């Protein structure tokens, strides 16, 4: 895999995690209390043996720089490896021009000078595990020009709304694609992960620039299904598309189930992240915790059920937290009741004694708020 350049791409406007994404880019969203979304694709790259990685950031890059750092915690800080965080250099007059093609074009020098024969491009908002070396091997065996990773699902009416769905023939050649509007139950969801030669990648960037200034990589690939051999590679196991606040909620809460979590978190395929030194969580005498993910440094004196609790959270006596996600350093006051609520970091729920949302329609408490 030393011939591969890994590219972590940013998301388009169909990804709208309202609230959380107001304060940080999608790759930096906290996940399961201790991870960030970018950790999954980065770990897939490094576990697959890819040590040269470029991370493209759409906006608000500070938290990505802080979390990713030198890449040492992903085991890519070696003499042969290199991690670069990239963003567009040209001023964006309108959001429609903030495309991955424009970002690639702004950093074309680093793509042209890369010595890698192949590129593997994947976004951070898709959460799953995969060995990209097997994808590259299939790409070579199939003599494909482009390989697209996809996931078959029978949940397309409820989830993956706005994602690209693929139509494949009997030989798994991609013949068409469209946007999932939730009309059909079973669809093949594109994970927007692509394998191709670096030479073809550069050609597609140039072709997209000539075609339209608002084209994305997936647009120019779609326009050339007939010209190139585009094959699908099916991924197995759990896949979550974190493209809405409701899907963010669903993914976190489903992974409090141990059977689900085992499918994603495999000791033989570790999900690496930036660690934080903090004391163990303290549980009071009357604390009740059921089927939940609790991070370090918390003080739990109330009841927590089917929830994800970030680092340094305080839950006071008599408080009840059910089916909720609390980001770091949240305080839940005495006798408060939270159900289907997402509370952003450093917020305090003290005066309002009851907040109740719904599954896929959670209540969001903004960052540093006091209610």
Image (cartoon, grey):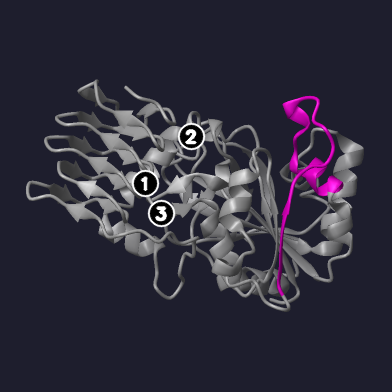
Question: Gap in Å between the C-alphas at discs 3 and 2?
Answer: 16 Å
Query: Is 89 colored magenta in this rendering?
Result: yes
Task: Residue 171: give x, y in percent of width and height.
Answer: 64, 62
Alpha-carbon neighbours of circle 3 within 10 Å: few (<14), some, or many (≥20)? many
Q: Nearer the viewer, residue 324 or 4?
A: 324
Q: Nearer the viewer, residue 169 or 330?
A: 330
Alpha-carbon neighbours of circle 2 within 10 Å: few (<14), some, or many (≥20)? many
Q: Give the quadrant of residue 101.
A: top right
On the question of residue 168 being in view, the answer is: no
Give the mark nearer the N terminus: 1 vs 3. Answer: 3
User: Which residue is denoted by mark 1 in the rendering?
Assistant: 252
Q: Residue at x 42, y 30 (%)?
A: 368
Give the mark nearer the N terminus: 1 vs 2. Answer: 2
Q: Nearer the viewer, residue 230 or 268?
A: 268
Q: Which residues are magenta?
A: 81-106
Asked whether the residues under the numbered discs 3 and 2 touch, taking CB atoms below 8 Å apart as contact, a structural biologist would say: no
Residue found at the far left of this picture: 286
Question: Gap in Å between the C-alphas at discs 1 and 2?
Answer: 14 Å
Question: Viewer-nearest of labels 1 and 3?
Answer: 3
Task: Residue 51: give x, y in percent of width and height.
Answer: 67, 71
Label 1: state its secondary structure: helix
The quadrant of the rendering that contains the N terminus is bottom right
User: Which residue is denoted by mark 3 in the rendering?
Assistant: 34
User: From the viewer's perspective, is 321 left or right of 249?
Assistant: left
Asked whether the residues under the numbered discs 1 and 2 touch, taking CB atoms below 8 Å apart as contact, a structural biologist would say: no
Query: Is 326 colored magenta in this rendering?
Result: no
User: Which residue is denoted by mark 2 in the rendering?
Assistant: 20
Q: Residue at x 36, y 34 (%)?
A: 342
Q: Residue at x 29, y 32 (%)?
A: 340
Q: Residue at x 45, y 54 (%)?
A: 35
Give the mark nearer the N terminus: 3 vs 2. Answer: 2
């Amino acid at each position: 895999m030393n011939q591969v350049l890994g590219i972590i791409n940013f998301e388009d406007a169909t990804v709208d995690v309202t609230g959380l994404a107001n304060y940080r880019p999608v790759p930096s969203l906290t996940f399961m209390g201790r991870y960030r979304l970018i950790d999954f694709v980065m770990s897939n790259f490094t576990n697959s043996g890819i040590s040269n990685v470029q991370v493209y950031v759409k906006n608000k890059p500070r938290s990505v720089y802080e979390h990713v750092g030198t890449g040492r915690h992903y085991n890519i800080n070696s003499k042969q490896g290199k991690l670069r965080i990239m963003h567009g250099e040209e001023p964006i007059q309108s959001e429609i021009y903030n495309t991955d093609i424009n970002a690639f074009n702004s950093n074309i020098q680093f793509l042209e000078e890369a010595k890698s024969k192949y590129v593997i491009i994947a976004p951070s908002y898709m959460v799953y595990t995969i060995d990209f070396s097997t994808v590259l091997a299939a790409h070579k065996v199939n003599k494909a020009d482009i390989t697209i990773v996809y996931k078959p699902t029978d949940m397309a009416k409820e989830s993956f709304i706005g994602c690209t769905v693929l139509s494949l023939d009997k030989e798994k050649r991609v013949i068409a694609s469209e946007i999932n509007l939730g009309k059909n139950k079973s669809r093949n969801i594109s994970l927007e992960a692509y394998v191709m030669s670096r030479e073809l990648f550069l050609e597609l960037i140039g072709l997209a620039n000539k075609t339209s200034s608002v084209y994305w990589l997936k647009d120019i690939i779609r326009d050339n299904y007939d010209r190139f051999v585009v094959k699908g590679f099916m991924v197995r196991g759990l896949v979550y598309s974190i493209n809405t606040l409701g899907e963010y909620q669903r993914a976190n809460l489903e992974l409090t189930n141990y059977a689900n979590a085992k499918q994603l978190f495999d000791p033989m395929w570790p999900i690496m992240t930036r660690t934080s030194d903090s004391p163990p969580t303290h549980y009071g005498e009357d604390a009740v915790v059921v089927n939940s993910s609790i991070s370090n440094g918390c003080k739990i004196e109330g009841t927590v059920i089917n929830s994800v609790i970030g680092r340094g959270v305080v839950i006071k006596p008599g408080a009840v937290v059910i089916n909720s996600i609390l980001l770091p350093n949240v305080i839940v006051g005495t006798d408060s009741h939270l159900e289907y609520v997402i509370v952003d970091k450093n917020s305090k729920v003290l005066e309002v004694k009851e907040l109740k949302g719904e599954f896929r329609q959670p209540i969001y408490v903004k960052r540093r708020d006091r209610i």
